[in-house]
Image (cartoon, helix red, strand yellow):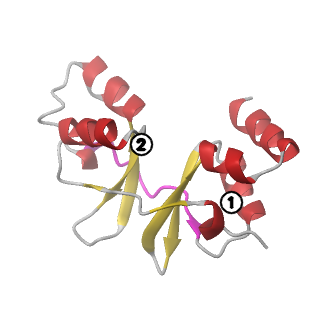
Amino acid sequence: MTTARDIMHAGAECINEDESLLVAARMMRDLGVGSLPICGNDDRLHGIITDRDIVLKCCAEGRDPAEMKAQDLANGAPHCVRADADVSQVLRTMQTNRIRRVPVLDDNRLVGMISEADLARHLNEEQIARFVESVYA
């Protein structure tokens, strides 16, 4: 059985909820990623921020990314999967919620992320086609 842990990108870096969106944007640039998990001072996952969120919900609104905090864009608990979840559960979570990336938790701690690129490396063409159709349709 292939699990979330088998296909995830381990060691996902978090942005602290108190950090600015400017720091988040620079982290994304430096890490070469388009999203970051938002972790709270309690070391728990509080949300996910994307580069698109920063552009649409901060810059396009005329707000200052140096002043706006990551927690300002953490809209409720993100959809997650457990590290021992079967890959079919991972796909179901992503397809049902039409999300392109999902955090992986072990004992309620963030241990990795699964993105579309991770799916592409580990799934067959039919599984990928179904995923794309359900998330982008």
Q: Amino acid at mark 1?
A: Val
Q: Is 76 situated above or below 116?
A: below
Residue behind mark 2 = 35
Q: Which mark is residue 80?
A: none
Q: Magenta residues: mostly which secondary structure?
A: loop
Residue toward you, 99 or 7: 7
Identity of the residue drawn at 30% across and 18% down: 60
Q: Residue 125: x percent and y percent?
A: 84, 42
* Dot 1 alpha-carbon crowd within 10 angstroms: few under 14, some 14 to 19, many 20 or more: many
Identity of the residue drawn at 18% across and 31% down: 65
Q: Amino acid at mark 2?
A: Ser
Identity of the residue drawn at 27% across and 28% down: 58
In magenta segment, residue 1? no
In this orientation, does residue 99 appear? no
Residue behind mark 1 = 90
Q: Secondary structure at mark 1?
A: helix
**Magenta-highlighted residues:** 72-82
85 lies left or right of 64:
right
Residue toward you, 71 or 16: 16
Q: Residue 7: x percent and y percent?
A: 64, 61
Residue toward you, 26 or 73: 26
